[in-house]
Amino acid sequence: MQITPIACLSDNYAYLVVCPGTRKAAIVDPSEEAPVNKVADEARAADPRLSIEAIWNTHHHHDHVGGNEAVKSHVGAKKIYGYQSDKGRIPGQTELLESGDSFELGDLKVRTIHIPGHTLGAVAYVVTAPGGAGKPDETAVFTGDTLFLAGCGRLFEGTPAQMRASLVALAGLPKDTKIYCGHEYTESNLRFASSVEPNNPNIATMRAKVAEERGAGRPSVPWTLEEDLGVNPFQRVDSKEIRATLGIAADADDATALGAIRKAKDNFK
């Protein structure tokens, strides 16, 4: 599959997702009209066969849906997807998703996972491109503001227990799944991760990698689920070092630990 990050607002990402074989495409979280339409126009000029079929929204926040209707009109998309509980909060929504719903974008298989925590109607889109000819399938996941690279979203509507369950569900995807999240927060997230788990060598490795990418003006996205599990403190709630650093009891349950880590991140400078 072909995935193009689109920088929007101050630090948001929208995405253009294209099925190589059929040239059918979708846009994820068009927060604003101008940059998304510019990328869409360039893609269609390069390949007149390209057909942008739909918009996929991960949740209802304005910095993810603000461009929905203008982008839909401009590119001729027919559908706007979002979770069923976000009905009335996502502009132009036509498709009311339940967790586990599946659909296709050309040859790409799309499955949804309800991932409450940041908001109650957050949903992830798991996209699989069949490998063919003995090659493995390729998997990507669009996580919005629930799972960031090395982080998770603030708990605006959900609870620590909900966020923990959502992160566990995402952690169950194939380890080579590429994560595409909603914001460029990776450097800050890794600084926090380093502060709570300073002896984790994976964090230093990823900080160097991300510094190189950002220094060259490239987005930090994507990286793999396996890479994230090695550094993300919200996926590492059982780490003895993190618990000791933050004074979390060894016998505290995972949701309690996540809540404490989230509070520490909220106050991190």
Image (cartoon, rainbow, N blue to C red):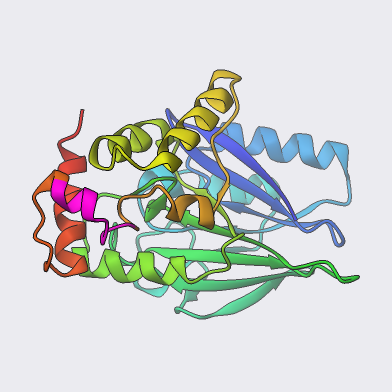
> Is 238 part of what is drawn in magenta?
yes
Tell me residue 100's x, y (percent): 50, 80
Tell me residue 2's x, y (percent): 74, 50
Q: Does residue 169 appear left or right of residue 141 in this picture? A: left
Question: Is residue 146 at least partly visible in the picture?
Answer: yes
**Quadrant including the N terminus:** bottom right
Q: Which residue range is magenta in the image?
A: 236-244
> Is 201 part of what is drawn in magenta?
no
Tell me residue 174's x, y (percent): 58, 68
Tell me residue 219's x, y (percent): 56, 32
**Quadrant including the C terminus:** top left
Q: Nearer the viewer, residue 152 or 33?
A: 152
Q: Nearer the viewer, residue 33 or 168?
A: 168
Question: Is residue 87 at least partly visible in the picture?
Answer: no
Q: Does residue 59 appear left or right of residue 119 in this picture? A: right
Q: Is residue 253 above or below residue 195?
A: below
Q: Residue at point 35% right, 58% down?
A: 235
Q: Residue at point 48% right, 71% down?
A: 172
Q: Is residue 96 above or below residue 239?
A: below
